[in-house]
Amino acid sequence: MSATNLLFAGFGGQGILFSGKFLAYKGLIEDRQVSWLPSYGPEMRGGTANCSVILSDEPVGSPIVSEPDVLIAMNLPSLDKYEDAVVPGGKIFVDSTLIERKVRRTDVDVYYIPATKLASDHQMPTLANMIIMGKVLKECPDLGSGHIPDALKKVVSARHQDLLSVNEKALQIGHDYQ
């Protein structure tokens, strides 16, 4: 069985749930079995937010991701909380603009992306999440690189369709980041 368990974590307002939903729709469009489980603190914007996504070739038994294959950490408390939960051989993606410390583990692949700075530099301050997602899609070939425009059309609301191209640009910035 081929399944990828992902955990997106940060604080409210960073687009954590949006990123997870984008990936979940991408999986659905690709005819995969999908689970998307959002979780956020009562204070929403500024509070904690995380999102579990499972993409599988077979039915998903539980939506809970307690041992992620992939962790996307958008703030230090998230890295502190979930770093040790990642499976050996897994991948950790860190927004290095907001997280200064390095990952302590040596049995995982780590990618430091200054997503918040890149988003600001490209006049897209709310899209650090999609910049990291571009890097995730590049470094996790099991997730595939197709159906991105279709998935974006599902998660970008009808009244904000003008933001499709800027989201695609953010994904490309992350993909191209070395």
Image (cartoon, rainbow, N blue to C red):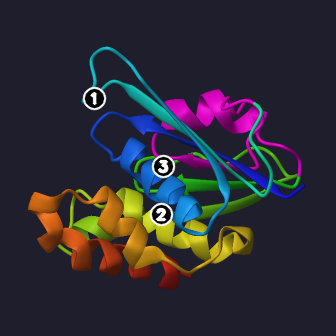
Mark 1 crowd level (few <14, some 14–19, many ≥20, 10 Å Cα): few
- Mark 3 lies on a secondary structure that is helix
Q: Residue 97 vs residue 83: left or right?
A: left
Residue that mark 2 sits on: 132
Residue that mark 1 sits on: 46
Could you tell me which residue is drawn at 51 percent across and 37 percent down? 51
The mark found on residue 20 in the picture is: 3
Q: Nearer the viewer, residue 55 or 32?
A: 32
Residue 164 position within the rendered picture, expressed as x and y whole percent measured from the top left: 24, 73
Q: Residue 44 vs residue 36: left or right?
A: left
Magenta residues, start to end:
62-88
From the image, state whether disc 3 or disc 1 is nearer to you: 3
Q: Residue furthest bottom?
A: 176
Mark 3 crowd level (few <14, some 14–19, many ≥20, 10 Å Cα): many
Residue 66 magenta-drawn? yes
Q: Nearer the viewer, residue 87 or 116?
A: 87
- Mark 2 lies on a secondary structure that is helix
| Amino acid type shown at disc 3 | Gly
- Mark 1 lies on a secondary structure that is loop
Q: Earlier in the sequence, mark 2 or mark 1?
A: 1
Marks 2 and 1, how far apart at CA: 19 Å
Could you tell me which residue is drawn at 89 percent across and 47 percent down? 88
